[in-house]
Amino acid sequence: MAFLKLADVSKSFGALTVADKVSLEVPKGEALGIVGPNGAGKSTLFNLITGNLRPDEGKITFKDQDITKVPANRRIHAGIGRSFQVPQPFGSLTVFENLLAAASFGRNASEQDVAQDCLEILETTELMAVVNTPAAGLPLLNRKRLEMARALATQPDLLLLDEIAGGLTDGECVALTDTIRSVNAQGVTIIWIEHVLHALTAVVQRLAVLDFGKVIAQGNPTEVMGSDAVREIYLGADS
Amino acid sequence: MIGIDTIIQGVLLGGLYALFASGLSLIFGIMRLVNLAHGDLIVFAGYLILVGVSVFGLNPFLSALIAAPLMFGVGWVLQLAVLNRVLGHNILPPLLVTFGLSVILQNLLLETFSADSQRIPVGVLETASVDIGVTSLGLLPLLTFGSAIAVILILNWIFYRTALGRAFRAVSDDPTTASLMGIKPNRIFALATGLALVIVTIAALYLGMRANFDPTTGPARLLYAFEAVIIGGLGNLWGTLIGGMIIGVSQTVGAALNPEWQILAGHVAFLIVLLIRPRGLMPKQ
């Protein structure tokens, strides 16, 4: 069975359908990219996977467990970590404390046990220079790094990255994709929503396209981006 | 006659007000909940201690030690069963609920203990004093002030040095994101209220040993607590202690000038600080 499986998952807000019978399977260790126009339901998909939203219909299984009705904080302990599109650090905590809190509560462990690991994650995500800075004062790149570091601190088996490369310069973007690739290489399954396609395709093995809450294409990144359906969405071609 | 003695009495009284205020500040800081029943909870804890002393013949401090975990339980249950349900973007429901709680507590105490004013008997401690040369200080006010400092030190230690404290600050920043890190905001809130009511018990012990109290004493204590928090600046417990001291000194100085001015002087000092520094003397950041 798949590591993460969504079967006919639907969600509507009133008349607006944000997920329309979405079915998606992600094998363990894969890096899956998700693209689609604004409002296609990409972040909603993440909210459904993390448990911030409950689907109206359908079933979500993770590691062969039905998690459709499991609350968000228990999905963390099951191994689902997430970074937000708009970074939401705990502003009054320092960078290190952000990680400590995420690690100790995300893993149900004492701070002493996770402190060393937190430092290693800060090393990997290149945040060592600002460990004792309150997170509220960080510039964008470091906020994005902190988003990822904090998600990693919960020791996820599945990491959800929401537009983590958006707004970064090319150089910053390369540094971040290197980090994501090495996290994936360590065996962490990744689902990554991104508009910066060259960053995305440099990492992911598979690509899924979302439009109006539906998965309209998935498969090899090059083939998917070349398909008619995708060109229609992005270029408006009516072939 | 205003002497050094008057000032010192006021400063020490400030310790009591800081004790009133710390619990209030803790709850507001973590969940943005203004607990209008805070003063009544102090009086409630006062009666709880009094029962231990007068019915079971316990030493007041021992009685408070037993009341503290009970009050923690009261806070825990109150938060989980009632307050968590009304927390949200709208600040009105929690205000109404805690106001209702205040009315219920006052009437419950009135029904159980009557309107007679009570005092926690302290024996020799009441008149015991320490001679420091210029003046002699009452041991009880000194203990009160020392307890306030201890409470603030411990709270700051919890806030900045423990996992629980980081969880407090994390849910205060953003409960939704905190829950995605595996923190359970409702449980953290319950712990915070429990902790606040332990501080309430300490405040009740010194209030009850220092002065008479009756079921309607609560709201005025709430007012002093508010003023101490606002004068000091939200989110800064040392500021709250300074705030308490300013009210305390104003009251003792006011009383020295004219006994009728005691309460008024404290409120006037509060208004003056608000006019000069609307965000308090030591606001956060």
Image (cartoon, rainbow, N blue to C red):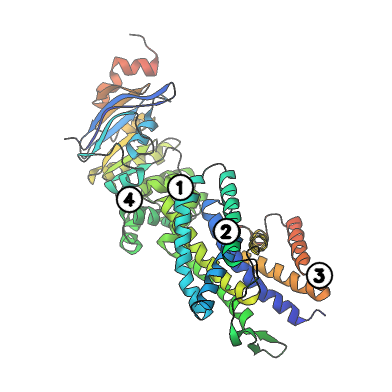
The label shown at residue B260 is 3
Number of the front mark, 3 or 1: 3
Q: Are marks 2 and 1 in contact (CB under 8 Å)?
A: no
Secondary structure state at the residue bearing disc 3:
helix
Q: Quadrant of the N terminus of chain B?
A: bottom right
Q: Which residue is mark 4?
A: A154
State the CA–CA distance, disc 2 to disc 1. Answer: 30 Å
Report the amino acid beneath label 4.
Thr
Tags 2 and 1 on a common chain: yes
The residue lying toward the viewer, choosing from A87 and A70, is A70
Q: How many marks?
A: 4
Q: Is residue B232 left or right of residue A152?
A: right
Tags 3 and 2 on a common chain: yes
The residue lying toward the viewer, choosing from A35 and B247, is B247
State the CA–CA distance, disc 3 to disc 2. Answer: 29 Å
Q: Residue at x 55, y 55 (%)?
A: B29
Q: Decide: is B98 above or below B135.
A: above
The label shown at residue B175 is 1
